[in-house]
Image (cartoon, rainbow, N blue to C red):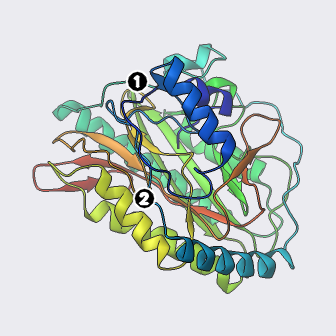
Amino acid sequence: MLLCTPVGFRQARVEMVHQQSFASSFWGTASLQSRLAAFSSVAPHIALGKTRELSGRFVIARKKSGFAEILLNRRLSEKEKTLHSTRPLLKRGTVSPRLPVPSHIPRPPYVTSPKVPDFAKLPQIQDSHGINCMRASGRLAAEVLNYAGTLVKPGVTTDEIDKAVHNMIIEAGAYPSPLGYGGFPKSVCTSVNECICHGIPDSRPLEDGDIINIDVTVYLNGYHGDTSKMFLCGTVNDDAKKLVEVTRMSLEKAIAVCGPGIEFKQIGKVINDYADQFGYGVVRHFVGHGVGKIFHSAPAVLHFRNNDRSRMVVGQTFTIEPILTIGGIEDETWDDNWTVVTADGSLAAQFEHTLLITEKGVEILTVA
């Protein structure tokens, strides 16, 4: 997960060479249209939500017909009413102090700065040593994530999950990558129900029927391994289960199209096409990213339809991490500058893997 404060997102730069028609009501709002016009006239770079470095290309999704938009909005409205009638919105709990890391464990360079690191412009291509290190960090991240999932039960706090994750990572001689990233106070992200991403672990107990994304990144031997998935807490309703399963499948389908020479736009097309079958929104403010020695770098991997024609190359490592919603894709950020929730309170789900492009196709690195 790209862990930047929303302010950091908007400071990151995105090449804008040409524009196309906007795709949805989200992109079509007057405020965004006017901002885009202003940016294009005064600056060659903009940032929209999560960093979008597109190798000199600004990409926007294809527009639905008016009739399709009406049908989709009607279906989403019906789902929102069903879910909101039984589920209260999230409330912030108490955030405990930052946990210590033993001095002998190597730290990523950004830990000493309160600022969000710049989004590195170059993709990360691994040699044989780098590949071996990425496999090790990816495997550890997956093991930690699987363990964290066993703790998801009604009454358990996300702060307890954070402590368990933190201890498992440092016991393995690794550093929890989120800790200290731009001032992020915890070792893992825990995003519950309508939280899109970057949820800060706190004292709120998980409740029966919650869904939660746990996002784990570890820094081991100088390389980051980044992964996340959804977990069900207790008895979860069918609508929430379906969202989680469709999101998981969207990631699998996106991974299946990856390989050397494949255009990155194929990822967004596959995910968006699949989500459309179920009337789900695809969040646009947050993207996948290159990963390796650097936590976040090019390419910015878009999960919605786009025209990014850059291609995957052998040895390249990056994440795919789609976020789907039952309702709208607009988001709001809490005043902690990290927690991002759906503006309409509808459920969101996300899955993520770190991938390696090989001569024969693609390898998932974040598997235990």
**SS for tag 2?**
loop
Total tally of numbered discs in the picture: 2
Separation (CA) of disc 2 from disc 1:
28 Å
Between residues 216 and 328, which one lies in front from this camera angle?
Answer: 328
The answer to whether 82 appears left or right of 35 in the picture is right
Q: Position of residue 272 (x, y in %)?
A: 44, 65
Q: Which residue is pictured at 75% across the width and 53% down the height? A: 158
348 sits to left or right of 105 = right
Please report the residue visible at 36 percent of the width from the left and 30 percent of the height from the top. Answer: 17
Which residue occupies the extreme top position in the image?
A: 112
The picture quadrant where one finds residue 362 is bottom left
When the figure is inspected, residue 75 is found, relative to residue 189, above or below; the finding is below
Q: Label 2: which residue?
A: 62
What element does badge 1 sit on? loop
Q: Earlier in the sequence, mark 2 or mark 1?
A: 2
Residue 298 lies, in percent from the top left, at 36, 32
Give the numbered dot on residue 120: 1
